Amino acid sequence: MSSRLKDVAALAGVSVRTVSNVVSGSGNVAEATRQRVQQALDELGYRPNLAARNLRAGRTGLIGLVVPELYSPYFGELASLVVEAAQQRSWTVIIDQTFGDAEAERRLLDGTQGRLVDGLIISPWALGPEEVTTHARNAPVVLLGERPPRGLADRVAVDNVAAADEATSHLLETGRRRIAAIGLQPHLRNGTADQRLTGYRNALRRAGAVVDDALERPVRELHRKDGAQAMASLLDDPSAAPDAVFAFTDELALGALHVAHERGLRVPEDLAVVGFDDIEDGRYAQPPLTTVAPDKRQLAERALQCLADRIYSPDNGVPPLDVVVPHHLEVRTSSARKP
Amino acid sequence: MSSRLKDVAALAGVSVRTVSNVVSGSGNVAEATRQRVQQALDELGYRPNLAARNLRAGRTGLIGLVVPELYSPYFGELASLVVEAAQQRSWTVIIDQTFGDAEAERRLLDGTQGRLVDGLIISPWALGPEEVTTHARNAPVVLLGERPPRGLADRVAVDNVAAADEATSHLLETGRRRIAAIGLQPHLRNGTADQRLTGYRNALRRAGAVVDDALERPVRELHRKDGAQAMASLLDDPSAAPDAVFAFTDELALGALHVAHERGLRVPEDLAVVGFDDIEDGRYAQPPLTTVAPDKRQLAERALQCLADRIYSPDNGVPPLDVVVPHHLEVRTSSARKP
DNA sequence: GGAGGGTATTGCAACGTTGCATGCAACGTT
DNA sequence: AACGTTGCATGCAACGTTGCAATACCCTCC
């Protein structure tokens, strides 16, 4: 069924080595020979066996991308960009989903299943960064969107504190004072929510606005349903009475938007909403959603850059990098100035 | 840096073969030896080299999933399910994006880059099914959502004609007569849009309703922006004047919904909208979107089942299967009965 | 006590590829 | 004419793993 270098060599009447040279384009091969071999290659439909090549080379050309879930728009978009950027480096991406399960994250980092990938990009949820770096045994690891204790692993992310601060400040500037935060995740070791909460509080304090426990709402996951639940609980709580919501992800924001509509609240007149991630749905929401837009393309690109550096010069002693990727506030109708 | 069986064997004072037996759990190993070897394995943090294992076995345990794009919600959800189902079969998934490029689809099917995967699940856009099956040289292929000429390759999909018929009939039942179709793709070889168009026309004809060229709108791609454009052109065309829209994907429907809102049309009062795919966003749209819901989990599961059969019994002469996966119409507010 | 059967362990070879060293022939230079 | 150089082609070995077959050993049974 499948032909080896050996078969091609036999057909072309040359040695295996020569065929290999033709395939790889390396070494010296006479034009006449090259053509003869090429013809044999075409005739047999030769395709290199990558397992063999990888074994020989000690590299697989595969990198792993570990995300909590692929079906959510943010990670879908991100994965798409990583795959695209990896292609340009002739890498192939293996995508794993952990569904936020600590054991799954540990297993993938451990490489318990075996050494298959040359490097790993992971967006951890359940594991704290210390644990992530302890478990990364086999291959270089880049953390995506997580802040590890300095000096443990490369990391690529936006400045969550600053971004959350901007989003909240923007709401303050539009005249809102009781700004709720949706998206706290006290049960996760992942620190992203904490950072966004910090930025949110910073902005409120600086402006002398209300910092109120009743306005800060936890969620289990980051989907629309969680945002919807949080929004409902917020509206049901008389002590909350928000005039704006900063949701820590766009999906949460869209869930919140949904409930606001259901309850007959007008957005942005009665309630302003800002999200985070700039997923495509937000652009087409009713009304279009204001959001913090990380430069996702750069996020993917820089993560791969870090990985490439570690893979191609493993022991050059460069200390772990902390790459901050730019973001901007994408202002749309959902946070229009109060009339 | 990384330890081989050889290293473990040396440390434990046994042969390489015995270590291999311990790792794989096969063969006879005395309990005492097993423990000694296990200790050495742990101490050295042994991880099997999968390239070597794959070379030996002639299989890689990898399957390819080829989709046009990963960032669109439908394919994101689908990819998520495929990855999940593959894990249960101890397969790892490699995801490739073609962005609808014929050359990219051809290259991946050809395996020009080398034989890496044991099988391929492809959702073709640019290539017609004949070409798909001609180019599948290396590994078994399953077509996802495409109808190949009978007898060329396994295929897993919903019954697009029947589903489109149901969606259209539903709109007719709610009292609409001028039902537009958004999503024709005359420039693609992929036949999905054609099938949905057929179902749409069938339903109209059977009900004696209007079949009008002006109501059938092509799109370039299947994103919100394309749906928005098509909707705008529909509303700008006085000869169209639709009272309902059947969009061939939910994303198109969401784009159309967006434009309807912009133009001050009330949905569902002035215009009913039905989509196709049942992506999560549709559930949270304003108003929630009626849609044809394919059983995506089964789509993924059955595709893997086909692949498994071909991989594990390659030459058993079973003719290509045509697996039809169930769907249902998920009725939500966007197509509520006309008041 | 020797034959027979089972258990535990091992060595050899091969999967398909490429790095390295080497061989051979033809060429140009002194 | 002898020499070094270059271009082309080849053979050997190794990457780390596992299938197969062989070996060594111990125990049991007649």
Image (tube, coloured by chain):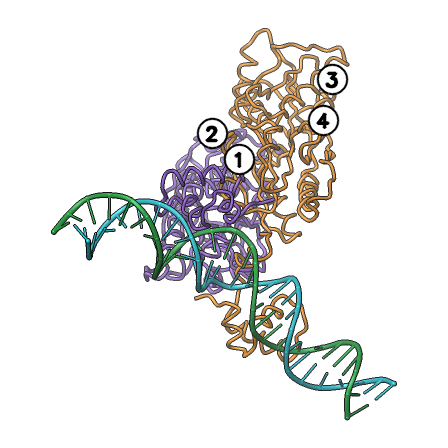
Chain colours: A purple, B orange, C green, D cyan
Q: Are marks 3 and 1 on the same chain?
A: yes
Q: Which amino acid is tagged 1?
A: Glu
Q: Nearer the viewer, mark 2 or mark 1?
A: 1
The residue that label 4 is drawn on is: B163
Q: Are marks 3 and 2 in contact (CB under 8 Å)?
A: no
Q: Are marks 4 and 3 on the same chain?
A: yes
Q: Which picture quadrant has residue B199?
A: top right
Q: Nearer the viewer, mark 3 or mark 2?
A: 3
Residue B115: percent from left, percent from top: 54, 45
SS type, badge 3: helix
Of B199 and A47, the residue lying toward us: A47
Q: How far apart are the alpha carbons under marks 4 and 2?
A: 36 Å
Of A29 and A227, the residue lying toward us: A29
* Residue A333, numbered label: 2
Q: Are marks 2 and 1 in contact (CB under 8 Å)?
A: no
Parent chain of label 2: A
Which callout, 1 or 4, points at the residue further toward the start of the chain? 1
Q: How far apart are the alpha carbons under marks 3 and 1?
A: 31 Å
Q: How far apart are the alpha carbons under marks 1 and 4?
A: 24 Å
The residue that label 3 is drawn on is: B203
Q: Which amino acid is tagged 2?
A: Thr
Most extreme residue toward the top is B239
Q: Are marks 4 and 2 in contact (CB under 8 Å)?
A: no
Image quarter of the C terminus of chain B: top right
Which callout, 4 or 3, points at the residue further toward the start of the chain? 4
Residue at image point 60% right, 47% down:
B118
Q: How far apart are the alpha carbons under marks 3 and 2?
A: 39 Å
Q: Nearer the viewer, mark 3 or mark 1?
A: 1
Residue A200: percent from left, percent from top: 43, 47
* Number of residue marks: 4
Q: Which amino acid is tagged 4?
A: Ala
Q: Which amino acid is tagged 3?
A: Ala
